[in-house]
């Protein structure tokens, strides 16, 4: 083995280097021994003997792929050949060798190793951008993070942004450009990747100091990054907000809401006057749709409202009147502060719009101590502080009064304490992966209403309906419905909001019912309702009649159900549903119009709505059936599967028994029997077939006996049929509530021509109803994972008894009863009328 001068065992070759790294370099490059380039490459890495060897590596000689992708998969025969050429070599030993190099080798050696690794991948020489630096830092992160392997901690400690810059210069990057190349490499995200790793080299005080020294470079680099990388940059800037004030000011009006929120959090580390100075210019220049967050922050700062007023009047530094959209936004913000916020800006129980109790401290001593500890962690002061506040926000359900968290944030010096706490409703994820504002219950609202009683301006903002989406891919929250539920907990309707609540109560939107509950019997609101009932506006007159009739007002008749949709858009069966069930259609129509779907197309789509019964999100509703055994059949009735055509006798298993007499009239548009019991069976196997005979109707009054059966099959997702039955019986009673169903499966070609926006409308509906519950009776079938319409599929069953068309079939019921799967029961309308439940078809789709 050739040994270069100055690298003999035990002899340092560079300041701070540990002995052994030259041999480690040879171990790293050992896979090249199976080709003829090994010695030349080693000479180049250790002594810069000849860069032309990089061109040889780009021809991908044997073993080069192992050097280029040390953590990837390589054929066993290649690994065996390398081990034979370099005894003792294994992938694990190669990784250990690389850690030794990364821990000890000087910068020039590290640069050449990175260039060799890059060339071995077959990539062309860099054209101005040192992509070899990406390859090198990726490997450093791979071998030093999330591992306790020997040497990993030393690598983590050594590799900072400063070292990366030094390596870049050693690799030929001009010193004046090294900081830019370093930040580009560490923050760059390859197309198609949403996760990063190299940026961890910017963690800690050393990384923060590097970013502060190169704030101007960072500002340029961040511009071209994807939204999540810009958001991460804002988090890092929070460590030194003054150094990055220009960048943070720009990100505060970024196109992405999450970036804006994080930038404003970082800016909160500055004093109020500096924040006003940074944000003021955007009032005139930023796109109006990106301004609400910055305007909201300004209105929470001393001097901020005045800055907004100067923009409105065209006075101040840049004297120019704003455009109409901007003017509406700014004027509304000023009015909120001047009319809805306590005089003098002092917010607390004594200045609230209605009587509020003192702040209730946490009953959990540990949580109380956590809140006390947060006072020493100013928000936006770094990742540790952000994580601590994030964790505190996750404990909301343990707080009897969210103002306790708000007060801790105030004590920590944050200027956004009230707003940040309120926004947790639309930004924080609760159970089931949904935002807590979307899951709010009256009991939850109890912990929130005192906060909004002290800050009516925030309640008024949520009445505008901001959906809490920081990015288009996020789930939305019906913020208006959310805040109305909070306002219902007020001891009385807050007087400053009565006019706005009255306008909602006299409208046609789904929110009118909740607004009326907030107003109760407020005399001003009822006077307005009587005036509207006697007025000429048709919508207000119908709404007032509905309201007053519900209160028992003499001489007032309620309008026809479904009046709020006007015309004939809704089928008659849908108009008869409870107003709460129709509310989802109102939200659907609202979102469809926001997506640009023409109103006529939305109304035509609403004409496809069908009534159904579905499991309520909270499991509420009347009992309509029982899950699992006992199986009660007439003595002479065959057990399904014995005479219903499955592959083997006994394979059909009872899933649910529906009490048809308990189904509300008009709950579905199916011609179901008015009474008796409907038993649904299933073959819960991963079989790509349609099985007939999945239901039995037992008329009311028919004598029955318990039938004990022992199905012999392996149900998907359960250990045995008995285990499936046990799970069903644990669920107990089946409770269903009236609901609306719209198509999610592909339509037939003729219907497609009538509905050119079908795909958009189906996506909106699927997003709105994704938590529709496990069970559905009637309505349209859910399109699970692209399976298609099971009703139309059923026409291909081919029982041979009678010919059917796809449009003859309807969904009888569906059940999300298996992991990543769905069971359907379908039947023709003719068979339903003739009570031929032996022709019910059962099918299951799962994507395990």
Image: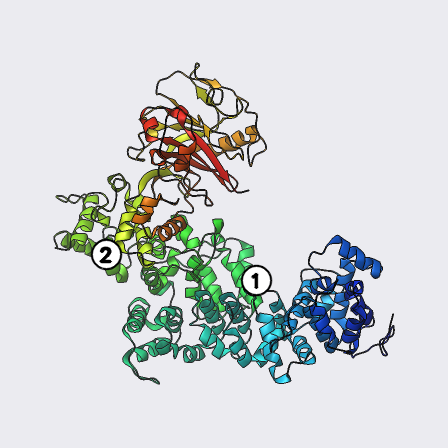
Q: Can residue 209 be seen in this view?
A: no
Q: Which of marks 2 and 1 is nearer the N terminus?
A: 1
* Residue 154 x %, y %: 73, 68
Decide: is 826 above or below 711.
below
Q: In this view, does 435 lie above or below 206?
A: above
Q: Which residue lies furthest to the top in this view?
A: 636
In the image, residue 558 lies at what x, y percent?
18, 44
Q: Is there CB contact under 8 Å for labels 2 and 1? A: no
Whole-percent x, y for residue 335 in the image: 29, 70
* Residue 487 sits in quarter: bottom left
Q: Mark 1 points at which residue?
A: 195
Q: In this view, does 126 lie to the left or right of 428?
A: right
Judged left or right of residue 481, residue 55 is: right
Near mark 2 (Cα within 10 A), the count class, few <14, some 14-19 or many ≥20, is many
Q: Considering only vertical position in the picture, is 644 above or below 193?
A: above
| Residue 605 image offset from top left, x and y in percent | 30, 48
Image quadrant holding the C terminus, namely top right
- For the residue pair 393 and 623, the one nearer the viewer reads as 623
Q: Name the residue under label 2.
A: 502
Mark 2 residue element: helix
Alpha carbons under labels 2 and 1: distance apart: 48 Å
Per the rendering, the mark at residue 139 is: none
Residue toward you, 829 or 35: 35
**Secondary structure found at label 1:** loop
Coloured how?
rainbow
Name the residue at 48% across, 75% down.
248
User: Is there any visible trace of residue 222 in the rendered image?
Assistant: yes
């Amino acid at each position: 083995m050739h040994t270069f001068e100055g690298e003999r065992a035990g002899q340092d070759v560079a300041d701070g280097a540990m002995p052994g790294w030259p041999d480690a370099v040879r171990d790293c490059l050992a896979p090249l021994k199976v080709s003829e380039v090994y010695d030349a490459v080693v000479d180049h890495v250790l002594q810069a003997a000849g860069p032309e060897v990089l061109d040889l590596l780009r021809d991908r000689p044997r073993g080069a792929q192992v050097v280029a992708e040390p953590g990837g998969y390589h054929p066993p025969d290649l690994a065996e050949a390398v081990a034979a050429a370099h005894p003792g070599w294994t992938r694990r030993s190669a990784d250990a060798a690389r850690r030794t190099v990364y821990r000890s080798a000087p910068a020039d050696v590290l640069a050449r190793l990175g260039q060799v690794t890059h060339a071995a991948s077959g990539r062309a020489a860099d054209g101005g951008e040192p992509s070899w630096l990406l390859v090198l830092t990726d490997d450093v992160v791979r071998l030093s993070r999330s591992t306790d392997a020997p040497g990993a901690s030393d690598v983590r400690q050594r590799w900072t942004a400063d070292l990366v810059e030094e390596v870049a210069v050693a690799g030929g990057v001009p010193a004046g450009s090294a900081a830019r190349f370093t930040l580009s490499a560490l923050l760059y995200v390859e197309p198609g990747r949403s996760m990063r790793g190299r940026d961890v080299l910017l963690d800690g005080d050393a990384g923060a100091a590097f970013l502060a020294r190169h704030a101007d470079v960072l500002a340029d680099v961040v511009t071209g990054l994807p939204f999540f990388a810009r958001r991460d940059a804002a988090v890092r800037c929070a460590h030194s907000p003054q150094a990055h004030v220009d960048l943070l000011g720009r990100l505060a009006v970024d196109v992405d809401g999450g970036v804006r929120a994080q930038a404003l959090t970082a800016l909160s580390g500055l004093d109020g006057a500096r924040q006003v100075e940074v944000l003021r210019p955007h009032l005139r220049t930023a796109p109006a749709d990106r301004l609400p967050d910055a305007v909201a922050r300004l209105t929470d700062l001393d001097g901020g409202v005045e800055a907004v007023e100067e923009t409105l009047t065209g006075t101040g530094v840049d004297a120019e009147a704003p455009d109409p959209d901007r003017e509406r936004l700014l004027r509304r913000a000023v009015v909120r502060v001047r009319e809805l916020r306590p005089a003098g800006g002092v917010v607390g129980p004594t200045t609230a719009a209605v009587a509020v109790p003192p702040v209730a401290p946490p009953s959990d001593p540990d949580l109380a101590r956590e809140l006390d500890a947060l006072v020493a962690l100013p928000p936006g002061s770094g990742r540790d502080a952000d994580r601590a506040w994030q964790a505190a926000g996750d404990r909301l359900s343990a707080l009897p009064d969210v103002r306790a968290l708000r007060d801790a944030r105030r004590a920590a010096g944050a200027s956004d304490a009230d707003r940040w706490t309120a926004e947790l409703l639309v930004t924080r994820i609760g159970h089931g992966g949904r935002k807590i504002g979307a899951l709010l219950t009256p009991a939850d609202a109890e912990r929130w209403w005192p906060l909004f009683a002290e800050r009516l301006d925030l309640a008024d903002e949520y009445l505008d309906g901001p959906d809490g989406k920081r990015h288009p891919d996020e789930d939305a929250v019906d913020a208006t419905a959310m805040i109305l539920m909070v306002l219902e907990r007020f001891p009385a309707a807050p007087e400053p909001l009565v006019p706005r609540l009255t306008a909602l109560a006299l409208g046609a939107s789904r929110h009118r019912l909740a607004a009326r509950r907030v107003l109760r019997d407020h005399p001003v609101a009822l006077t307005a309702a009587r005036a509207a009932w006697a007025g000429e506006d048709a919508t207000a007159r119908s709404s007032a009649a509905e309201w007053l009739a519900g209160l028992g007002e003499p001489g007032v008749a309620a309008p026809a159900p479904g009046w709020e949709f006007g015309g004939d858009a809704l089928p008659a069966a849908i108009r008869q549903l409870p107003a709460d069930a129709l509310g989802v259609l109102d939200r659907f129509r609202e979102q469809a119009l926001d997506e640009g779907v023409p109103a006529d197309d939305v109304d035509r789509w609403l004409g496809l709505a069908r009534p159904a019964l579905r499991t309520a999100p909270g499991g509420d509703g009347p009992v309509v059936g029982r899950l699992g055994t006992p199986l009660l059949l007439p003595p002479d009735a065959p057990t399904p599967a014995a005479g219903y055509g499955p592959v083997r006798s006994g394979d059909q298993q009872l899933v649910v028994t529906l009490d048809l007499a308990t189904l509300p009239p008009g709950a579905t548009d199916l011609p179901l029997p008015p009474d008796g019991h409907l038993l649904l069976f299933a073959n819960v196997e991963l079989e790509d077939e349609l099985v007939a005979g999945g239901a039995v109707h037992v008329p009311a009054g028919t004598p029955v006996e318990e039938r004990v059966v022992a199905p012999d099959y392996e149900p998907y997702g359960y250990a045995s049929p008995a285990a499936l039955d046990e799970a069903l019986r644990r669920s107990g009673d089946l409770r269903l509530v009236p609901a609306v169903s719209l198509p999610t499966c592909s339509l037939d070609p003729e219907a497609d021509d009538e509905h050119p926006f079908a795909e958009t409308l189906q996506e909106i509906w699927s997003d709105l109803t994704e938590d529709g519950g496990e069970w559905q009776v009637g309505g349209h079938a859910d399109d699970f994972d692209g399976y298609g319409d099971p009703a139309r599929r059923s026409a291909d069953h081919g029982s041979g008894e009678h010919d059917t068309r796809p449009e003859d079939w309807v969904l009888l019921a569906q059940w999300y009863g298996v992991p990543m799967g769905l069971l359907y029961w379908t039947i023709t309308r003719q068979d339903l009328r003739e009570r031929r439940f032996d022709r019910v078809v059962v099918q299951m789709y799962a994507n395990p």
